Image (cartoon, rainbow, N blue to C red):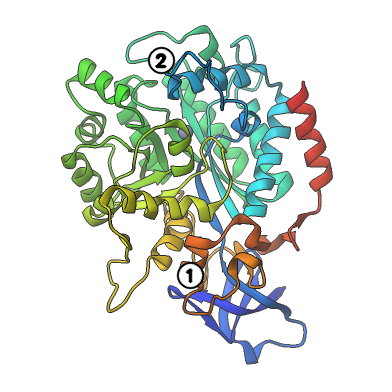
Amino acid sequence: MSTTLVPDLLWENGRFVPERALVINGDRIQAIVPAAQAGPDAQRLPRRALMPGFVNAHSHAFQRLIRGRTQWRPVEDRSADFWSWREEMYRAALMLSPDEVEAVSAFCFMEMLKAGYTTVGEFHYLHNDRSGAPYDDPAELAQRVIAAARSVGIRIVLLHVAYATSGIGQALRPEQLRFATPTLDGYLDVVDSLQAAASADPLVTVGVAPHSIRAVPRDWLPAIRDYAQQRDLPLHMHVSEQPAEVDAALAAYGLRPVELLEQDGVLDARFTAVHATHLAAHEVNALGASAVTICACPTTERDLGDGFLQAANLLDAGARIAIGTDSQSIIDPFEEVRVIEYHERLQRLRRIVLLPPDAEGAADPGPLLLDIGTRAGAAALRLPAGRLEEGSLADLVAVDLDHIALAGCEADTLAVHLALGGRAECVSDVWTGGVQRIAARRHADEERLRASFRAAVRS
Ligand SMILES: [Zn+2]
């Protein structure tokens, strides 16, 4: 059965155009046709612009619980930084029961859907019970997170995390035992089981994710790389988020993190480096030459004081940039993409820095920033999504052209208006796999999800 959507404007080939209709068949886009061809049964979307859903390529859903709880320090201690934030995160991670992991994740995923994210790449590293022992099913918590995504209707790529050391060559600390995947074979067995379970559900796929060079022995990396290649899975990893990680890699291996990954053959088009905020110039070139994706999480990186992404240099070198909500300090894809451009302006004392490589004449950063938010993330998660074209997944967002933040925009300025002036509340309707999940800014299960989240916060 097919459904036809007829918005005022539709995102096609990098611009918003009028008089187009989108035909959905099953979970895919069947065609884009002239609006005049839409029949009487078509769903009209007056004062709406239709675009691909945003892709959140890096998330830790349970961290939604600590939003607002880490924004303090002892007055006399000016040294609050990433590492002190991490202690607070560990406390939350240690506290959650499986039911609470599912409830917090479901609420977080609903917030993502309402903001226009249709896919989440969930970098999942909560594996064991609160004592650090494996559950009877070692994939218990991963399955809970997947169940949460299915219950709200967001597409999920479960990036199952390998986590074995506290720092390079150091045993896990007691508060990290919940994350432990003590053996490589055991870790890959769980990924096998997750793939088998996911094969029945079109909204669920799986990827591999060595947590970082801090948390995984170096000799695991080639095996995880080969595993991903053989099964065509995405491979994601935190890379060079903090100067201390670079220093630790130099001390232990005599190599910077990207140098190590290059030497071990990990860098390729299936690889996504999350953050990559502390790169030397030759590392930027190495990432670009291998066509890797950098997952920028700029709202988290500014919250944690991580540093700036070298976005223009990375794009010039040939890398792709995607976005992630990471710590969930804010869930708003428009904010995520615009910070990438604005950080460049602040560092370079210039304006209009990021333009598409094929731009001609007078150009604005809107189309590139929307691509970063949609198509790049889909590629990083190896999904046929992030674009409105025949055969793509019908993961869609309608934005409300009457929202006050968009007043004054025209078809030819809407992309940049959204990218630099839009906000999550501009999203009115959301579809994943051809099914409408958000209608008039509401999720059908919203009250129950809010109540379960509140209960988890209070426990
Ligand atoms: Zn992360």
CB under 8 Å between callouts 1 and 2? Answer: no
Name the quadrant containing residue 261.
Answer: top left
Q: Is residue 173 found left or right of 255 in the rendered image?
A: right
In the image, 143 versus 257, the foreground residue is: 257
Q: Is residue 162 found left or right of 248 in the rendered image?
A: right
Q: Is residue 19 found left or right of 159 in the rendered image?
A: right
Which quadrant of the rendered structure holds the N terminus? Answer: bottom right
Mark 1 Cα shell of 10 Å, populated few (<14), some (14-19), many (≥20): many
Q: Which numbered circle lies on residue 84?
A: none
Query: Vertical placement of 431 versus 268: above or below?
Result: below
In the image, 342 versus 309, the foreground residue is: 342
Q: To which residue does mark 2 refer?
A: 165
Q: Residue at x 39, y 34 (%)?
A: 237
Q: Position of residue 441 (x, y in %)?
A: 73, 59
Residue type (three-letter) at the residue carrying disc 1: Ala
Sooner in the amino-acid sequence: mark 1 or mark 2: 2
Query: Vertical placement of 342 versus 166: above or below?
Result: below
- For the residue with label 1, is its CB less than 8 Å from the closest atom of ligand 1? no
Q: Is residue 338 found left or right of 308 in the rendered image?
A: right
Residue pushed farthest front? 76
Q: Position of residue 312 (x, y in %)?
A: 28, 54
Residue type (three-letter) at the residue carrying disc 2: Thr
Mark 2 Cα shell of 10 Å, populated few (<14), some (14-19), many (≥20): many
- Closer to viewer: mark 1 or mark 2: 1
